[in-house]
Image (spheres, rainbow, N blue to C red):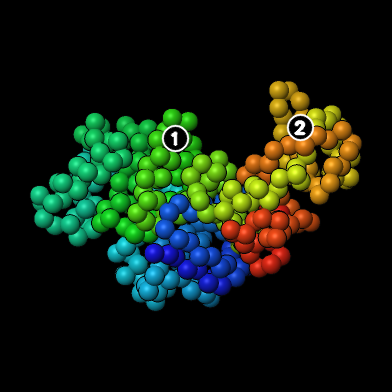
Amino acid sequence: MSLRIERLSKTYGNGTVALSDVTLTIPRGMFGLLGPNGAGKSTLMRIIATLQEPDSGSVHFDEIDAIADKPAIRRILGYLPQEFGLYKNVSAEDLLDHFAVLKGIIEKTERRLIVDRLLEQTNLAADRHKQLGGYSGGMRQRFGIAVALLGRPQLIIVDEPTAGLDPAERLRFLNLLAELGQQAVVILSTHIVEDVSELCSRMAIIDRGEIRLEADPLAAIAALHGRVYQRAVERGDLQSYNDRHAVISTKLFAGRTMIRVLADAAPGDGFEPALPSLEDVYFSAMRPATALVPDRGVEEGTASGGNAAPLSG
């Protein structure tokens, strides 16, 4: 069971290149598609979900051609878009039952069992009679997943599912996605690095429509061991350090400005070695001047196209 995307490209009428020659192989389990807003993630998800046409390229799920045979892919697809509307004055139970009918689940007893199971699976059983207008953001997201799971899909796409959720709801939602990844191909499209680091055994980083890196997250982190250094600096000195070093991130920590740099040898200048993280992988891959080189350990995953840039954000 796998999804194969080959040389997919899409340019909008205003000249914006949303996707440029994207090639990915996505196996069963959780796959993270990581990138900043506007990177092309949603365009890629909509093409896979048969809601948009690419200019060129192909998408196959096992033997199904998702471009040529849209009804076949839709039968095995569950899709939770970044934004979706709900009828606020309808209960979760009634609306899920309605969607089940639209999905072709006609027999009443079977439909009732399926609705009950999905409400339990998404931890909404206790609120089944509550109107959706009274649901929290996390509850609405979990209801969206319940709808997406109708028909036991083999391919599940979730686009920015944890944006705006509080920590407890986010954790509950991620645990649910992890369960789903045991039986299906699940694509998690997000700009939140922590979501990918906690859930996904494979990932790709996309920016400006191009794949910057495709890798096993742990292997990508291991490739940066001994190459990440950090120090506290004065805010006014940031430009000077940017001029002299490959700065991959800057953040406030305990009231101090901390910078992290990428270097093949100790840079001196007051820097100390730092343990790399997936955030370092992300920002390194987005930098145009550096690259994560496969022979340093990224393969398990591969740097796409042979000239992957470091993650930039």
Quadrant (top left, top right, bottom left, bottom right) of the N terminus: bottom left
Q: Is residue 86 visible?
A: no
Q: Residue at x 43, y 30 (%)?
A: 168
Q: Could you tell me how many numbered marks the image carries? A: 2
Q: Is residue 255 visible?
A: yes
Residue 111 in the image, given as x and y percentages of width and height = 15, 50
Are the two marked residues, 1 and 2, in contact with CB atoms closer than 8 angstroms? no
Mark 1 or mark 2: whose residue is earlier in sequence: 1
Considering only vertical position in the picture, is 65 above or below 28? Answer: below
Residue 313 in the image, given as x and y percentages of width and height = 67, 48
Which residue is identified by label 1?
171
Q: Residue at x 57, y 53 (%)?
A: 216
**Which residue, as the protein is rendered here, is positioned at the far top?**
254
Residue 73 in the image, given as x and y percentages of width and height = 35, 67
Which residue is identified by label 2?
258
Q: Residue at x 45, y 54 (%)?
A: 187
Q: In the rendered view, does 281 fall on the left or right side of 54?
A: right
Give the secondary structure at mark 1: helix
Nearer to us in this view, 134 or 121: 121
Label 1 amino acid?
Leu
Q: In the rendered view, does 269 fall on the left or right side of 151?
A: right
Considering only vertical position in the picture, is 10 above or below 196? Answer: below
Q: Alpha carbon of mark 1 to alpha carbon of mark 2: how far?
A: 28 Å
Q: In the rendered view, does 207 fall on the left or right side of 3?
A: right
Label 2 amino acid?
Met
Label 2 neighbourhood size at 10 Å, few (<14), some (14-19), many (20+)?
Answer: some
Q: Which of the 4 quarters of the picture holds residue 137? A: top left
Q: Residue at x 21, y 34 (%)?
A: 129
Residue 67 in the image, given as x and y percentages of width and height = 42, 73
